[in-house]
Amino acid sequence: MESTVKTSASEREIVQVKNYKIDTLVFTAGFVPFCNVPVCRATCCYWGVYVDVKEREKILEYKDLILKYMDETQPHDVELWFEKEEWDDADFPSGKCVGTNVYNGKCVFLTKEGYCVLQIAAEKNGMYKWALKPFYCCIYPLTFWEGVLTYDDGHAQDLPYCGINAVHNHAGPVVEICKNEFVYVLGEDGYAELLEIYKKWKQENSNISGVK
Ligand code: SF4
């Protein structure tokens, strides 16, 4: 897993929904209408992801099931799935995370067709589609940074289809496009509250370039 750099939370404009602090970057950053894997080839998965150590435990618990859906471009040796080093990070529930390994130039869990084998294994076995998928993969392009829910602009620097420099492909701001990801974190009521805040914020900031 490779790291990206973001500005400190203290330098950003924050709004609050329930107990969550949310960066207004999600009001201005753009995103594509949906994740079009045949077009983007899941480039966002090429660097791997940091997962909570508890998520690693759960994935390893289901290793036999996951192995059934891995292809020849993925490591069938479970020892190769995760980096050895654990990191202290308060943006993870247990306070400790670990990176998935990169293998053949992509996250170990990415199939050659560009789909996450953790989601495939869950869906094929009657589980909720995100039951095995790491939290930060489920909410992408959102992320938590220093306790603030924000747009992952660091990761988006290098993504040619949906990223920060692919403005020509963007269909609207992250807050409008990424409903499922926000609902996953905030719940339906929390997302509705965020949209109300966004509406007011837009009226107050209509003079800022990029705010429509
Ligand atoms: S765990 Fe799955 S969704 Fe997350 S980076 Fe790896 S392949 Fe992509």
Image (cartoon, rainbow, N blue to C red):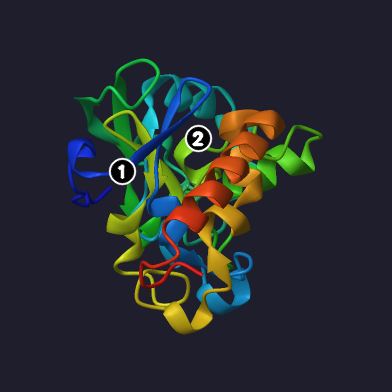
Q: Would you place residue 208 above or below residue 137 in this image?
A: below
Foreground of the two, 210 or 105: 210
The answer to whether residue 17 is left or right of residue 47 is right
Image point 71% across, 33% down: which residue? 188
Q: Residue type at mark 1?
A: Glu
- Callout 2 secondary element: helix
Closer to the eye: label 2 or 1: 1
The answer to whether residue 57 is left or right of residue 155 is right
Image point 31% across, 38% down: which residue? 99
Q: Would you place residue 113 above or below residue 168 in this image?
A: above
Q: Is residue 81 visible?
A: no
Q: Which residue is mark 2?
A: 135
Residues packed near mark 1 inside 10 Å, few (<14), some (14 to 19) or many (20 plus): few
Earlier-in-chain disc, 2 versus 1:
1
Image-quadrant location for residue 148: top left
Residue 160: x percent and y percent? 39, 77
Q: Is residue 92 visible?
A: yes
Q: Which residue is mark 1?
A: 13
- Callout 1 secondary element: loop
